[in-house]
Image (tube, rainbow, N blue to C red):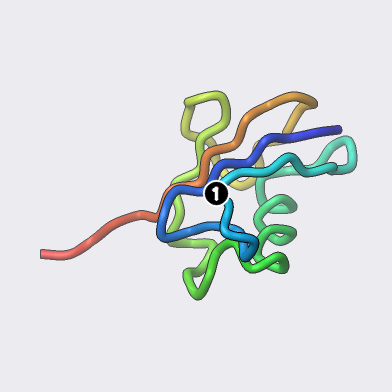
C-alpha cells in the first residue's frame, strides 16, 4: 500500500524534502512507519516518543493500522517554559 508522509520542520528526509510517498505492507501500523522513517533519517535525533502523529488530520496512536492512500503528518511535540 502507498502512504503519503509529511514531516514538519525540524523533521524531514535527508534529501531535503518534508514529504514523500512510501510503500508499506498491508497491516502496517504507525509504529512500523516510524521505524522505517527513522532508518531513513527523517526523525533526525528526535525520538519516536516526542512526536504527534495525525492520519487524515486526526491524532492517532502508534498501534493505528494504516490503509492505502492515507496521509500521515508527523509533528515534533514542542515543550519549554
Quadrant of the image occupied by residue 15: bottom right
Q: Residue furthest front?
A: 16
**Residue at screen point 48% across, 59% down:** 11
**Residue at screen point 62% across, 65% down:** 14
Q: Residues within 10 Å of mark 1 (few under 14, many from 20)?
A: some
Between 2 and 65, the one nearer to me in the picture = 2
Q: Residue furthest bottom?
A: 45
**Residue at screen point 41% across, 54% down:** 9
Q: In x, y percent, where is residue 7?
A: 52, 48
Q: Residue furthest right?
A: 25
Q: In x, y percent, where is residue 53?
A: 51, 43
**Residue at screen point 89% across, 42% down:** 25
Instruction: Report whether 8 appears left or right of 31.
Output: left
Q: In x, y percent, where is residue 10?
A: 41, 60
Q: How many marks?
A: 1
Q: Quadrant of the C terminus?
A: bottom left
Q: Is residue 34 above or below residue 55?
A: below
Q: In x, y percent, where is residue 27?
A: 84, 37
Q: Which residue is mark 1?
A: 18
Quadrant of the image occupied by residue 56: top right
Instruction: Report whether 48 appears left or right of 51.
Output: right
Q: Quadrant of the N terminus?
A: top right
Dot 1: element: loop
Instruction: Report whether 36 appears left or right of 17.
Output: right
Amino acid at each position: 500500500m502507498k502512504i503519503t508522509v509529511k514531516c514538519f520542520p525540524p523533521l524531514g528526509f535527508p534529501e531535503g524534502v518534508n514529504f514523500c510517498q512510501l510503500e508499506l505492507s498491508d497491516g502496517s501500523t504507525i509504529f512500523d512507519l516510524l521505524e522505517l522513517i527513522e532508518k531513513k533519517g527523517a526523525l533526525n535525533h528526535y525520538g519516536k516518543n516526542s512526536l504527534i502523529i495525525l492520519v487524515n488530520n486526526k491524532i492517532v496512536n502508534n498501534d493505528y493500522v494504516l490503509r492505502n492512500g492515507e496521509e500521515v503528518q508527523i509533528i515534533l511535540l514542542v515543550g519549554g517554559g
